[in-house]
Image (cartoon, rainbow, N blue to C red):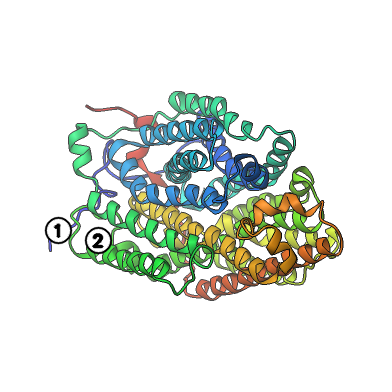
Amino acid sequence: MPPQESNLTIKPPAGDAVAVRLPKGPRFWLMLLALCMALFLSALEFTAVATALPTITADLHGTDFVWVGSAYALASSAILPMTGGLAQIFGRRPAFLGSIILFTIGSAVCGAAKTMGMLIVGRTIQGLGGGGILSFTTIIISDLVSLEERGLYAGGFYGFTWSIAAAIGPVVGGSLANMGQWRWLFYLNIPLCGLSGGLAVILLNLPTPAGTWRDKLSRMDWIGNFMVIAATCSITIALTFGGINFPWSSAHILAPLIIGLVGLITFIIYEAIWATHPLVPFSLLSNRSSFSGQVLVLWKKKYTITRHAYLDFIPVYFQACKDADAISAGVRTLGLASIAVTGLIGGVSVKIFKRYRPQIWISWALQIVGGGLMTTVKSDTSTAATVGFSVLYGVGAGINYAVIVYPVQAPLPIKQAAPALAFFSFLRSFAGVWGVTLGGAILQNELLRRLPEEFLTQHSQDVALAYSVIPLIRDLPQPLKQDVQVAFAESLRVVWKAVVGVSAAGLVSSFLMRGLPLHTATDKAWDPSKAVEKR
């Protein structure tokens, strides 16, 4: 077995990895503004498109709506394993700017899309950029503030930014969709990406590692990257088509699913034994608390059958069951803005009390209760009750978002922040692929069982696509309309039950972690005041 030197822990550019606490002057706050702006764009895009998807699907005459969300999530997962190495080998700023460029190109392609295929290609490019933005903003903030303070910034300010985007995204998406201007969901990103990138060029003057491009490329674990990307794609294909295009027991589904799972196992073995510059240093998983934290991340985003179940499927509920247009459905999801407030509170609480386990336990409990209440929602449940349940869920989700990183990083040395955060982001996004796809699959399969036969006969080509039939519900005659609305509500209740189950698994997993002291300094190697590029 060759000696392993992680590409994520190669000697950084500007001196030794000595702990340092950085001052927070005007330049720091402007850098934080640039990072939050990029994160806002990524989050806004995800949530706005979900609400506008029925209109987009109808306009493009498409049938692959699941792939519009899955392509973005899949591409994000594909790029994330590389982000730690890219940040460490090429430098934070070049990697971050590259992500913004990809996101801009993807937005332009989506805006110009004439077919669903072109839209999915654009969403894939967007996902590559969005995944990079998600990871690099997290890594950069770890260079600027200590773990002790990170809850306020990464959990608080980042969480607040993400949550505001998540709250207004459905309204923005719904408004543009109702006006027949859904393409501006993507075109508006272009000038905003230019502004964010410009701020990054001016403000993110972080150290750039020395070495030629050839030397830097040789340090990337290309074999490991290929293995994890191929395995992720294979699993996603199986989850996307399972139960919709092909039965779950068919070879079309079982073959890619088994190949993908075997591929992931092979990837882990390869990284642990043969990789010279492994994507994921094995030491990250050998610590009980750090490992349990990563497991929590997996459950937390696998409950994209939880968080994205709310972001994606609450608008579906209001549009299908309450005759709400896209704007009204978006407004009724504003209860999730509670994520922003409680995320900030959660981050501040860790800074004050120097503890993170109680907040995690409370957050999971609140999500279980909120999800449990959602399982009682029927087609005739009042809007006030449904919004109230989502607020309760949002309180728990906000706290969880702010504090979930602590058990991952607290047991590790400061210099391992990049690999830990890259793996953290990968699990978050990869599990999100499962969540988006499985949430959609659950809804489609339940609708196939519950929709009235009369409706199935009239719209057989659309029956596997919930988003494509929503615009038809409002004009249906009674009692067929009521029967279809009941079918949607009952199908969504199965999604909410999945929310409860996965959240309960997250709560159980959280008991594995230990309460540890938090680092009070950052790594001098990435001190912005030492930014000198060597060639």
- Give the SS element for disc 2: helix
Quarter holding residue 18: top left
Of residues 454 and 55, the one nearer the viewer is 454
Mark 2 neighbour class, 10 Å CA radius: few under 14, some 14 to 19, many 20 or more: many
User: Residue visible at 26% across and 66% down?
Assistant: 266
Q: Is residue 521 above or below residue 485?
A: above
Where in the figure is residue 116, as x and y percent of width and height?
A: 53, 42
For the residues labelled 2 and 1, the Cα–Cα distance comes to 12 Å
- Lateral position of residue 125 relative to residue 94, left or right: right
Q: Residue furthest left?
A: 2
Look at the image and tell me whether residue 265 can be seen. yes
Instruction: Name the disc covering residue 3, or none.
Output: 1
User: Residue visible at 79% across and 46% down?
Assistant: 328
Question: What type is the residue that disc 2 sits on?
Answer: Glu
User: Residue visible at 78% across and 51% down?
Assistant: 332
- Give the SS element for disc 1: loop
Q: Is residue 458 above or below residue 287?
A: above
User: Residue visible at 53% across and 68% down?
Assistant: 243
- Circle 2 sits on which residue? 271
Where in the figure is residue 305, as x and y percent of width and height?
A: 58, 63
Where in the figure is residue 126, as x and y percent of width and height?
A: 48, 39
- Lateral position of residue 65 relative to residue 492, left or right: left
Question: What type is the residue that disc 1 sits on?
Answer: Pro
